[in-house]
Amino acid sequence: MFGKVKQNLVLFFLIILILITFSLGIWFGRNQIVCQVCPPEEVDFSLFWETWNKIEEKYVGKGDLDTQEMIYGAIRGMVNSLEDPYTIFMEPEDTKIFIEDVKGSFEGVGMEIGIKDGQLQVIAPLEGTPAQKAGLKAGDKIVEIDGESAVGITTDEAVKKIRGPKGSEVVLGVYRESWGEKRDVPIIRGIISIPSLKFELRDDNIAYIHLYQFSQAAAYDFREAVINILESPAEKIVLDLRNNPGGYLEVAQEIAGWFLEEGQIVTIEDFGEGRDQELYKANGSSKLASYPVVVLINEGSASASEILAGALRDNRNVINEGSASLSEILGGALRDNGDVTIVGATSFGKGSVQELAKFSEGSSLKVTVAKWLTPNGDLIAGEGLEPDIEIEITKEDIDEGIDPQLDKAIEILKNIN
């Protein structure tokens, strides 16, 4: 009898021990840090962890250490070491802002900014926005944001500081070459809603198209403008790409189709390291190929503009000068046909492809994955597209409401029989 009781007690305690062991296993399993993505075997991270451990051991303020911010800081340092202004790590809040910007629903000042020659500057103030109304111009250098230095800041960090709720104010310290000094420019933020283009028929059978951006709506609006041109007595076109910061590749392809034959290459996406290139081809009707065109560009013509201009340039066998953005590419290509002249100022210059990689906790990496090449295989990124006829717009011109670049474009077209 006693032996049976003893046997039952042993069995009971054994069950309790198993349950405790099982519960602890679950608890530790839930609370231990598991590396979901294993580090590459060929990379030695021992120095990183030596430094991490030494900080936790010795740092005078170790009680205030924020491990998440330390991780983010380490990632930012790694990304910054690439010295590519378009490859950027974004924390969860920055990622949210970026996605809102892509959707086109945001509040702020309304301008495209970027890093050029290591300096934050305005690529283009967008049409009808607070930035444009405050007098900002393409090429303006932003040296301060609300009194804080903008030296060494990334584009996305600057966007986060500049944007904000409508009705609030941001003060930008702006340096302009013609000023020769920094000036504070206060801007009241607003809701940003940007049209894709402006179209009108002018005297002497000249059609005027001002493309503000290459958004998804721009493809449809450009098609409507083409229909109006074909149904009108218009025989010549002014294509205004000034302050157009670029946009979607698909829109570049569609607009190229009005000037190129079906199947002609619009651009080549080069992924480097001997990997396969991807070809993007025109699929339009070439309805505007016979129209004499003058293209207007300036320092704000950038980004996707390079693709379209390069496509038209190479497919029409023009002089290989190199180009720069969706606006730039469109301009260069049309000129190559022999019936296009580019007027204005040298464009911004950008020719790389970014891809957004989203991470599990809400952060993301906008990483450069490829570079654009023209159909002839020339690298698009560079110093920008130079106009055939360079004309500067002065402060006096602006004050008097004069546009000598547009006036020159119309003069050229009027002299074409």
Image: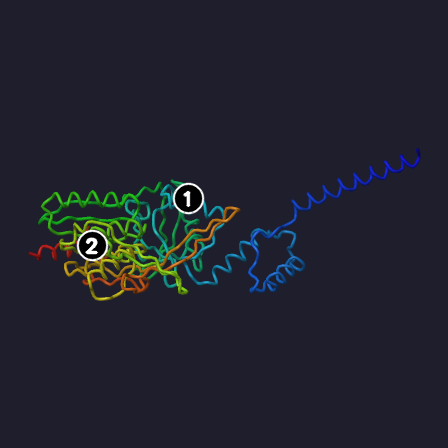
Q: Which mark is residue 92?
A: none
Report the residue at 41% width, 44% height from top: 164
Report the residue at 38% width, 46% height from top: 102
Taking the image as shown, residue 200 lies to the left or right of residue 78, namely left
Q: Residue furthest top?
A: 1
On-image quarter of the C terminus: bottom left
Taking the image as shown, residue 92 lies to the left or right of residue 117, namely right
Q: Which mark is residue 164?
A: 1
On-image quarter of the N terminus: top right
- Please name whichever residue, 329 or 70, is drawn nearer the observer in this view of the structure: 329
Q: Residue furthest right?
A: 2
Q: Mark 1 or mark 2: name the one nearer the start of the chain.
A: 1
Task: Give the image quarter of residue 318.
Answer: bottom left
Q: Position of residue 213 (x, y in %)?
A: 29, 49
Three-letter amino acid code at disc 2?
Glu
The image's colour scheme reads rainbow
Q: Which residue is mark 2?
A: 261
Secondary-structure class at tag 1: loop
Q: Residue furthest left?
A: 417
Q: Position of residue 34 (x, y in %)?
A: 62, 51
Report the residue at 13% width, 54% height from top: 290
